[in-house]
Image: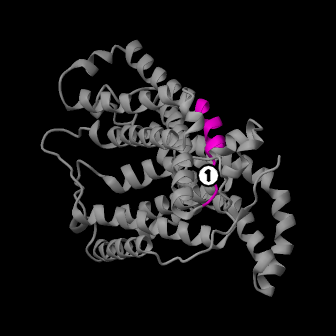
Amino acid sequence: MSHAPATPVGGKLTTPFFNFMALVALAGAAALVVRFAQGLGAATGMTDGYAWGIWIALDVVVGTALGCGGYAMALLVYLANRGKYHPLVRPAMLTGALGYTFAATSIIVDVGRYWGIWKIPTYVAWWNFDSALLEVALCVMTYVMVLWIEFSPSILERWRASGTPGQRSFAESAGPRLDRALPWIIALGLLLPTMHQSSLGTVMMLPFSKMHALWFSPLLPLLFLVNCLFLGYAMVVAESTLSSTGLGTRRETRLLGALAPTMAWVLILFVVLRFGDLALRGSLPAAFVAGKYAAWFWLETLLLLAPAVVLLGRNARERASTQFGAALSMLAGGILYRFDTYILAYDPGSGWSYFPSALEILITAGFVAAEVMIYLWIVRRFPVLSSATPAESR
């Protein structure tokens, strides 16, 4: 199919927004120094009751789902053969590669004896094949490499066009080999998220006696997999809208509008699965017991049902503002569901509580800021986004 070619955005990198992100990233780096110098106890609000906090619940569990835009688009473009969505693949792959890279980095920050993490992929004789966390660790490590390989055609394309002699030579040599390998790489890129996103749900099936009934479910692996799909689609819409507004790149309003029904039906599938499971297991009455758990449950539900209805309407196919609003609601509801499953719904018993420390929050904010800075640097210098802005898009 014919698409507008991806080109480097160009322009000045050090804008006021970029400089602000740099300050946040530097503050996060300073907090990291405290964490590694003084240990987890001095830097976090975690306890023996809450062995993980926002570095896992947000940076990893939510961060990897937000990075599933590449996975979601690959399912459409390569598996369902919807070639018209191909312009959305490169930015989705870049967002995914950055999201997973920083999620993997967060794991290193969260682990107490981080210097031994290299043993996970190498000490094969010690592997516990019944461990969901082992599968998550191995899949995430591998998927980070797969995402950067899938994104590498953008880098090679730039090097062929305007790189140094050495870069041009490497790109001309590696390009054909990469083209032959990409079908296998893409297949692996479809398999790995399916495995570890469902396993992130499996992890919270293990402490079943400590989980609230509204979030514990034998369907958690399936729910987390469907959840990562609609979060991935929402990130594609949000990234495309913000890029076109902030960088002046091509608006993909019609293309995102064509994606709207798919997003809506994935949302509806998630809500039906969740409510059907709660009803069949007799846990639905807990949603009508006054308290914080029911309030958060219904907030999640409303944040997901509202965009499902909106995305099935005509406005979602024609107006960028409607698409963006629906995507924000999807992101809020999907993020809240994952965070609630890992933090709110988990009760280790009386006497334990958790609230993230200032350093935890600062490190997470620093990671996000660094990710945004790297994204801006890459799209300004490499062909990722379609730069022409058609007049008919609004």
Q: Is residue 21 above or below residue 70?
A: below
Say left or right for 9 vs 176: left
Disc 1 target residue: 251
Q: Nearer the viewer, residue 107 or 9?
A: 9
Question: Could you tell me which residue is drawn at 37 percent across and 68 percent down?
Answer: 366
Question: Could you tell me which residue is drawn at 51 percent across and 49 percent down?
Answer: 238
Residue 260 falls inside the magenta stretch: yes
Q: Is residue 278 above or below residue 121?
A: above
Mark yes or no: residue 166 visible: yes
Q: Quadrant of residue 216?
A: top left
Residue 327, percent across and down?
A: 48, 41
Q: Is residue 103 above or below residue 348?
A: below
| Residue type beneath disc 1 | Arg
Q: Main secondary structure of the magenta part?
A: helix
Q: Quadrant of residue 39?
A: bottom left
Q: Nearer the viewer, residue 103 or 136?
A: 103
Q: Is residue 126 above or below residue 255?
A: below
Question: Could you tell me which residue is drawn at 50 percent across and 51 percent down?
Answer: 64
Say left or right for 206 vs 10: left
> What element does badge 1 sit on?
loop
Say left or right for 101 vs 281: right
Give the magenta part as a residue range. 249-262
Residue 341 falls inside the magenta stretch: no
Residue 164, percent across and down?
A: 76, 86
Q: Can you name the residue that lies furthest to the left here?
A: 351
Q: Residues within 10 Å of mark 1 (few under 14, many from 20)?
A: many
How many marks overall? Answer: 1
Coloring scheme used: one colour
Mark yes or no: residue 131 visible: no
Residue 99, percent across and down?
A: 51, 58
Say left or right for 354 vs 194: left
Q: Quadrant of residue 163?
A: bottom right
